Amino acid sequence: IYQLMANPAMEDGRLAGAVLVLLDVTERENREQLRREFTANVSHELRTPLTSISGFAELIRDGIAKPQDVQHFAGNIYTEAQRLIALVGDIIRLSQLDEGSVGSEKTDLRLDGMAASVVSRLQDAAAQHDVTLRTELKPCRVHGIAQIVDELIYNLCDNAIKYNRKGGSVTVSTAEENGQPVLRVADTGIGIPAAEQDRVFERFYRVDKSHSRAIGGTGLGLSIVKHAAAYHHARVALESTLGTGTTVTVTFPRPGEA
Ligand code: ADP
C-alpha cells in the first residue's frame, strides 16, 4: 500500500513543478489492523466473563438461586473473576513487552535453576492432569529479566500440561548447544495441526476455543512467549505432530552477545 503525497509548487498561478512522495504504509496499515483486531478481541474476552459474573450475582441477589445452588453459582463467579485477573495480567505484560517498558534491568540468570523452580510450582497442576513432569537440566546462564524469563518458561510448561493427555509426560530440559543456552519443553500431548502452528503465537488464537477456555487459558500465553523471547533476542521454534506431542525450543544468544 502506497500513500501518495503531492506537493505542487505554483508560480504566477501556473504549475511550476511538483514533488511526489511515495510512502510505503503497508507496515503501518498492518500494525493498525492488528491493533484494531486486538481491541475488538479484548472487548469480547472481557465481556464474556463479566456477563457471566453479573448474571450469577443477579440470581443470588434477587433470591432466585435455590439455597443449594448458591455455593455453585458463587464458585462460577470466582472462576470467571480469576479468568479476568489472568487476562488483565497478560494484557498488561504484553503491552509492556510491546513498548519495551518492562521496568527491570537484565541480570545474569541460571536458566536451569529457573526451570527447576517453574517445574516445582507446577507439580500440583501436573498431578491434577495426571501428567508426569521430568527434567534434564544442565547448567546454563542467560542474560535476562528474571520475571519475564520465568513467565516464558511457565507459559510453555503450563501449556505442555494443559494440552496433554492422561498418563502423558512433559520433559523440560536446559543445556548449552553450540555455546548457546537452550530451553526445551517437550510434551506427549494432543499436538497442533501443521496449518495452525504459526497462528498459535497470535494474540487470542486458539486451536480449540472451547477446550482452551474450559481449562482457563487466556489465549495470550504463546504471544507472551514470542514477545518475551524477542525481548531477549532469543529464537522460538515449535515442532508438533497431531496426536503425538509438541516440542518448543527457545535458543538464547551466547552469553556476552545478548
Ligand atoms: P491458551 O491460553 O489458550 O493456552 P496460548 O497462547 O498459550 O493460549 O496457546 C494458544 C493455543 O495453542 C492454545 O489454545 C492451544 O490450542 C494451542 N497450544 C499451545 N500449546 C500447546 C501444546 N503444548 N500442545 C497442543 N496445543 C497447544
Image (cartoon, grey):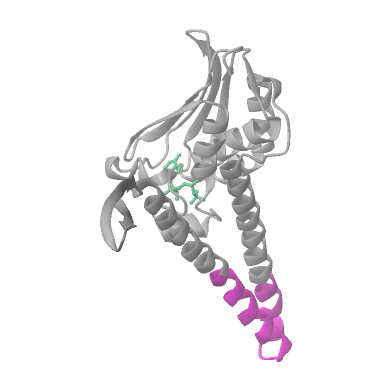
For image coordinates 46% across by 44% down, the residue present is: 163
Number of numbered labels in the structure image = 0
143 up-or-down from 27: above or below:
above
Q: Is residue 168 magenta?
A: no
Q: Quadrant of residue 10?
A: bottom left
- 45 left or right of 124 in image: left
Q: Main secondary structure of the magenta part?
A: helix
Does the rendering let one see residue 140?
yes
- 32 left or right of 70 in image: left
Q: Residue 108 at what x, y percent from top left?
A: 70, 18
202 up-or-down from 141: above or below:
below
Q: Residue furthest front?
A: 12
212 up-or-down from 122: above or below:
below
* Quadrant occupied by the C terminus: top right
Does the rendering let one see residue 207?
no
For image coordinates 65% across by 20% down, the residue present is: 143
1 up-or-down from 173: above or below:
below
Magenta segment, which residues? 47-74
Q: Is residue 51 magenta?
A: yes
For image coordinates 49% across by 37% down, the residue present is: 226
Q: Residue 198 at what x, y percent from top left?
A: 35, 41
Q: Residue 46 at what x, y percent from top left?
A: 57, 67
Q: In the depicted view, which residue is nearer to us: 258 or 15? A: 15
